[in-house]
Amino acid sequence: AQKVTQAQTEISVVEKEDVTLDCVYETRDTTYYLFWYKQPPSGELVFLIRRNSFDEQNEISGRYSWNFQKSTSSFNFTITASQVVDSAVYFCALSEQGDSSYKLIFGSGTRLLVRP
Amino acid sequence: EPEVTQTPSHQVTQMGQEVILRCVPISNHLYFYWYRQILGQKVEFLVSFYNNEISEKSEIFDDQFSVERPDGSNFTLKIRSTKLEDSAMYFCASSDPVRGPSYEQYFGPGTRLTVT
């Protein structure tokens, strides 16, 4: 059965610190897709990144970077030089090719608080 | 940029009443979803809809729930007889038929449903 685990419930850092949010997933499919979404205090879900299971290249987008490791079933997210505006709940999610609906299975989220 | 819209933003209803939550997906999208998020918890899949029919539904989506695409633009979620535990944020999402449902799901801003 598919599952996404975000073991860190809440992380608090001081501005300009680097922070890594962990995501571990379980799936039986060989083709699957991993996502990160940000939920700021206003409540909407903001797409950050999508990765397919065949692309293990790490990705960097500005201060954000993602480390996908199939060997450990992890898809971790690092924010470099964090800012107060990064304060939000971050969700990791999984969808599977074998699932006709491609529904997203979300982790429980990590609340990040960046203090000035 | 096209976006998913949802109305109302907040709905308060009494237990046992029927509610209809409305969504307007992005105009050329063909895959539609409803998710819900109980306050402080993770986002949970409710139902997916493609080609004018439900493609998958979760255990949460029991006989009290129904979805409809009454015209070419709206996508609605109806709860026939609301319970206190239906209080949650309900998100509508859609995905691009060209790129496919495994790509980003675009989320609406959500409808906060409060059942009293």
Image: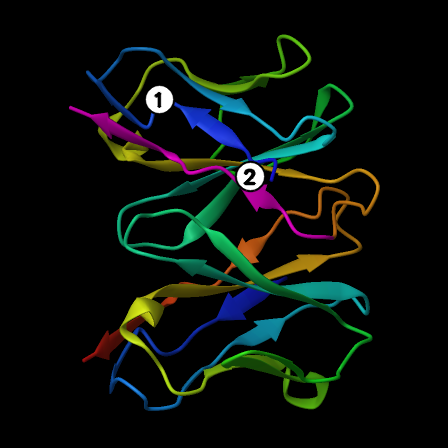
Q: Is residue A16 left or right of residue A2?
A: left
Mark 2 or mark 1, which is nearer to you? 1
Rendering coords of residue A87 (x, y %) = 30, 68
> Residues in magenta?
B103-116
- Where the C terminus of chain A falls, by quadrant? bottom left
Residue B27 or residue A35, whichever sits in front:
B27
Q: Callout 1 environment at 10 Å: few (<14), some (14 to 19), or many (20+)?
A: some
* Vertical placement of residue B107 versus A41, above or below: above
Q: Residues within 10 Å of mark 2 (few under 14, many from 20)?
A: few
Residue A12 placement (x, y as % from top left) = 24, 81
The dot on residue B112 is: none
Q: Nearer the viewer, residue A18 or B2?
A: B2
Q: Position of residue B26 (x, y in %)?
A: 64, 31
Give how far across and how far down residue B48 sits, in percent: 64, 34
Q: CA distance from mark 2 to mark 1?
A: 24 Å
Quadrant of residue A86 in the image? bottom left
Tell me the residue that label 2 is attached to. Answer: B58
Q: Quadrant of residue B70?
A: top right
The three-letter amino acid code for the residue at tag 1 is Pro
